[in-house]
């Protein structure tokens, strides 16, 4: 198993390097001269002079060939220096760290909401296969997957903030502020997880060892809890790793709607402000986080499934 | 492929299609959407760009079935015209993603070795970025416009197809007829075309159908955030963006465009799920041995 | 009175292609303490019959008829009572050891589960008992193996685990579903030994479902031959396995390697679309018009031996030269 982890880690390094390459090249995707853009941001369009632009070009090292720029950027990044925001001038690392807790809070709350809804719903659906409950849950899940989460967010806002006044429309701080964004973000995830839990459970319930367990005279409840659950959870757990990606995507939108001061909102704002350093920092963070979480999920998968954990003896 | 087997295979597919309610429902709605998109000028009561500022923010009534927005434009008409944009984006993006993905998947699965490793690493690298975020950055940096949105979305969508196709190719390689064909002297592209392609078509179709829905959803998200096609074009996502500023005064600006998105994506999800059941019914009930 | 008595059992699967009649009007008795073999090809419905007894079939199956265990009809039993019955009175020794054990649970705990449930033991004594059972079944290093997971054990070892599980409830009837399926000769002999040990030591009756005539010969007191969902011959094992009366059973024996490896011509009927009269009629050398029109009733050949054929008195004469030699009871 150690060999497996080692191999995955090596792969991780390769992927992360590739991620940095891709992130870096994104910046050079933008039409226009980066030095000029920075100058506009710093001095304003009216005060633009040729000198300023050339100054910036020299200071930022933008005259160097692209691959040198990349290596320089990489060197800085690895040391934790993500550069400076072109808008506020503050170090990017600070800007990100300032907002990271908010996003993590939202993500955690959403994950909680999602699991609390999806797991029981999926299990019950599978056990009561083809019952009215099953059809209702599956229809709900399908709607949830098809519904844009920003629409859901706005509808919830309309109902609970504007009409009913139970929760504040936007902002950050108390639990009341957290509920609507968490439900919005969590609902979409719940839809996907419900479907997966159900299909995974159905797959397990049709296996021979379940019939064998039933033939022993075990109660259905005992069969589900002691035999089926652990087997069906393994694929669900791996899905949760992928869910993190959806979570981050969703966070970008949900934070924009509810003015939640997290990294998602930072990213969107930076894109419009053409704040390259911040964009690079955020994107890199998202990608690396995602890759690491996936690796952790893969490893836990190996740990959970005894078929992989223990090598077969002769 | 045996002639009788091929013929009976087709009949069985059509048979299953007729019986599968969700696939049929999806198909019907998709066809309806197509008709709406094609005949938009005939179906819409008003011109989507026509502004009547004195009638801004009116509730649904006979003249304006879905009410008007903050510029006095008919929401119903804008939604109808928005169907064109959504379907266009969905289909084109999916076509490009699928094509790219299939090519890479075939190459990787077929040739294995270094080519395969390279392609899979690139896939992994792209997969490291959550889709919307990468599309957001690309579209945001490239600037507004439909082409940029489509480019961004296609760039973010091809990986899934590559993995699926590669997996299918590897599975087919195990089956042995592959080696037999090679032994007969068949060329590489011939094998890919004649032998591998028919076997990967089924999962690709399912993926593409669901992919259209996903592309429409992501495109709506980008438009909502203010990227992509610029106003005054009637795009569902940006209509919601406008709507969020008038949530209390004119909820109709939010409710109806979002509903349109949901129905459209739902239709493709129904169709895709249904196709999955039809084309690979082994996944359904466990068969009795 | 027989321990288990099936009358007019019909098992039908409702699929999207139609109704699959897996068991047709099956009547069979299993006397206490005796081993009854259920012999047939793949697809004859014998496994389905075994699962029907304990009502372990999937949701799309419907059962009609009567299955009386110690006088009580299993098919009309309430759920709780059925649960009590399973594992306790009637136990299943499932097919395919590699898929019948839960891959994420230790093998030992799958045995102790039965012990705690049926014998109301606490965990520690149950674990000791499980190890003792495995020792009796000649599993090497039981302490180590019981802590391992199914995929770490060989086929033969898994078979022993399943055997141990099946007797945790001290059942009066054991249903062994294709225990020798896909096994080589060595393993087959081992499994036969295990089964003999189980029935010998517990005195349980056994319904041995198998397609392997040698295994049946080794273990069975009585034998029922199944074809296309019906029992076509039923009687003493020794007699049927050496000199059967039903043309199908005769064909089965003739197809054995030592008797000439002569296959029965033709194909079995589809269970979706069964013929009206005798199910074997299309492949039978003795077939006449009446066979296609009317389903043959039980014809008694001698005491405790009957077959479903219009012409059993003639079947012997024409088939006499079909093969030479007898099927000996193989010692293990």
Image (spheres, coloured by chain):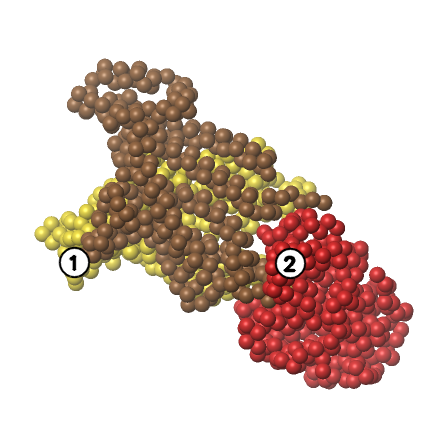
Chain colours: A brown, B yellow, C red
Quadrant of the frame with the N terminus of chain B: bottom right
Which structural element holds mark 2? Answer: helix
Can residue C278 be seen in the rendering of this structure? no
Q: Which residue is at 27% across, 25% downward? A: A90
Q: Nearer the viewer, residue A131 or A299?
A: A299
Residue B278 vs B180, above or below: the answer is: below
Using the rendered view, name the quadrant where residue C44 is placed: bottom right
Q: Count the numbered circles shown.
A: 2
Residue B156 vs C196, above or below: the answer is: above
Q: Is residue C153 left or right of residue B227?
A: right
Label 2: chain? C
Q: Which residue is at 33% across, 44% downward? A: A106
Which structural element holds mark 1? Answer: loop
Q: Residues within 10 Å of mark 1 (few under 14, many from 20)?
A: some
Residue B211 vs C116, above or below: the answer is: above
Quadrant of the frame with the C terminus of chain B: bottom right
Q: Nearer the viewer, mark 1 or mark 2?
A: 2
Residue B201 in percent (x, y) is at: 51, 50
Q: Which residue is mark 1?
A: B59
Q: Is residue B191 left or right of residue C38?
A: left
Q: Nearer the viewer, residue C70 or B114?
A: C70
Can residue C115 be seen in the rendering of this structure? yes
Q: Nearer the viewer, residue B221 or C330?
A: C330
Q: Which residue is at 44% across, 44% downward? A: A242
Residue B165 in percent (x, y) is at: 52, 45
The residues bearing labels 1 and 2 have C-alpha atoms spaced at a distance of 73 Å
Residue A247 in percent (x, y) is at: 37, 44
Q: Which residue is mark 2?
A: C126
Residue C240 in percent (x, y) is at: 82, 74
């Amino acid at each position: 198993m150690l060999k497996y982890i080692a191999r995955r880690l090596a792969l991780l390094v390769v992927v992360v390097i590739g991620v940095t390459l891709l992130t870096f090249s994104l910046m050079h995707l933008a039409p226009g001269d980066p030095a000029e853009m920075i100058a506009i941001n710093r001095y304003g369009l009216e005060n633009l002079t040729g000198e300023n632009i050339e100054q910036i070009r020299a200071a930022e090292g933008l005259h160097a060939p692209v691959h040198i720029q990349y290596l320089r950027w990489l060197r800085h990044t690895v040391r934790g220096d993500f550069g400076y925001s072109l808008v506020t001038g503050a170090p990017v690392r600070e800007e990100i760290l300032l907002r990271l807790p908010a996003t993590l809070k939202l993500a955690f709350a959403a994950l909680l909401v999602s699991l609390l809804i999806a797991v029981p719903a999926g299990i019950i659906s599978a056990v009561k296969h083809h019952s009215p409950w099953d059809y209702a849950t599956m229809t709900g899940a399908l709607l949830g997957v098809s519904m844009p989460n920003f629409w859901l967010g706005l509808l919830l806002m309309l109902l609970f903030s504007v009409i009913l006044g139970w929760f504040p429309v936007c902002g950050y701080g108390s639990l009341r502020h957290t509920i609507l964004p968490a439900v919005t973000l969590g609902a979409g995830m719940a839809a996907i997880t419900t479907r997966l839990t159900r299909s995974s459970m159905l797959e397990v319930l049709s296996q021979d060892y379940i019939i064998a367990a039933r033939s022993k005279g075990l109660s259905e409840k005992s069969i589900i809890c002691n035999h089926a659950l652990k087997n069906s959870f393994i694929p669900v757990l791996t899905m949760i790793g992928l869910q993190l990606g959806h979570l981050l995507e969703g966070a970008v939108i949900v934070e924009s709607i509810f003015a939640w001061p997290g990294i998602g909102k930072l990213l969107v704002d930076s894109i419009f402000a053409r704040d390259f350093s911040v964009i690079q920092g955020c994107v890199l963070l998202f990608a690396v986080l995602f890759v690491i979480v996936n690796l952790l999920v893969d490893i836990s998968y190996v740990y959970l499934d005894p078929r992989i954990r223990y090598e077969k003896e002769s | 492929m045996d002639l009788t087997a091929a013929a009976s295979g087709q009949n069985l597919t059509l048979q299953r299609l007729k019986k599968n309610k969700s696939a049929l429902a999806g198909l019907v709605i998709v066809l309806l959407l197509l008709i709406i998109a094609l005949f938009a000028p005939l179906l819409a009561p008003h011109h989507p760009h026509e502004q009547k500022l004195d009638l801004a923010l009116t509730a649904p009534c006979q003249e304006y079935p879905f009410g008007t927005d903050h510029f006095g434009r008919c929401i119903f008409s804008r939604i109808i015209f928005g169907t064109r944009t959504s379907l266009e984006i969905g289909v084109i993006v999916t076509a490009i993603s699928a094509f790219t993905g299939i090519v890479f998947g075939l190459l990787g699965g077929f040739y294995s070795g270094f080519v395969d490793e390279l392609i899979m690493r690139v896939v992994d690298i792209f997969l490291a970025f959550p889709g919307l975020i990468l599309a957001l950055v690309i579209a945001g940096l490239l600037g507004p416009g439909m082409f940029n949105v489509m480019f961004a979305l296609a760039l973010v969508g091809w990986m899934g197809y590559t993995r699926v196709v590669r997996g299918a190719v590897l599975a087919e390689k195990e089956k042995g007829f592959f080696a037999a064909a090679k032994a007969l002297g068949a060329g590489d592209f011939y094998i890919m075309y004649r032998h591998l392609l028919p076997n990967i078509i089924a999962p690709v179709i399912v993926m593409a159908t669901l992919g259209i829905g996903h592309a429409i959803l992501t495109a709506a998200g980008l438009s909502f955030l203010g990227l992509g096609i610029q106003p005054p074009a009637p795009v569902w996502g940006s209509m919601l963006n406008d709507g969020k500023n008038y949530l209390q005064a004119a909820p109709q600006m939010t409710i109806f465009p979002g509903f349109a998105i949901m129905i459209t994506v739902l239709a493709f999800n129904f169709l895709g799920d249904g196709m999955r059941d039809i084309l690979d019914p082994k996944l359904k009930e466990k068969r009795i041995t | 009175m027989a321990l288990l008595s099936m009358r007019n059992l019909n098992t039908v699967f409702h699929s999207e292609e139609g109704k699959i009649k897996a068991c047709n009007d099956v009547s069979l008795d299993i006397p206490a303490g005796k081993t009854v073999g259920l012999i047939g090809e793949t697809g004859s419905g014998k496994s389905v019959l075994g699962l029907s007894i304990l009502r372990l079939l999937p949701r799309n199956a419907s059962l009609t008829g009567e299955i009386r265990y110690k006088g009580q009809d299993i098919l009309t039993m309430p759920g709780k009572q059925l649960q009590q019955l399973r594992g306790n009175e009637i136990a299943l020794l499932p097919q395919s050891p590699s898929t019948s054990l839960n891959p994420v649970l230790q093998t030992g705990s799958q045995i102790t589960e039965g012990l705690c449930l049926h014998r109301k033991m606490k965990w520690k004594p149950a674990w000791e008992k499980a190890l003792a059972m495995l020792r009796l079944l000649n599993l090497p290093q039981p302490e180590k193996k019981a802590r391992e997971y199914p995929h770490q054990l060989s086929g033969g070892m898994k078979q022993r685990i399943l055997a141990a599980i099946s007797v945790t409830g001290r059942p009066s009837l054991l249903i062994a579903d294709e225990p020798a399926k896909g096994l080589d000769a060595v393993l087959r002999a081992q499994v036969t030994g295990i089964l003999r040990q189980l029935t010998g030591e517990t005195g349980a009756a056994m319904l041995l479902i198998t397609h392997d005539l040698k295994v049946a010969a080794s273990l069975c007191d009585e034998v029922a031959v199944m074809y296309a969902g019906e029992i076509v011959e039923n009687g003493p094992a020794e007699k049927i396995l050496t000199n059967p009366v039903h043309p199908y059973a005769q064909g089965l024996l003739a197809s054995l390697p030592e008797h000439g490896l002569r296959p029965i011509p033709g194909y079995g009927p589809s269970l979706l679309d069964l013929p009206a009269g005798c199910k074997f009629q299309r492949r039978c050398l003795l077939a006449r018009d009446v066979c296609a029109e009317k389903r043959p009733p039980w014809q008694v050949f001698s005491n405790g031996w009957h077959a479903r054929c219009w012409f059993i008195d003639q079947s012997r004469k024409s088939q006499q030269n079909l093969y030479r030699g007898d099927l000996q009871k193989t010692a293990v």
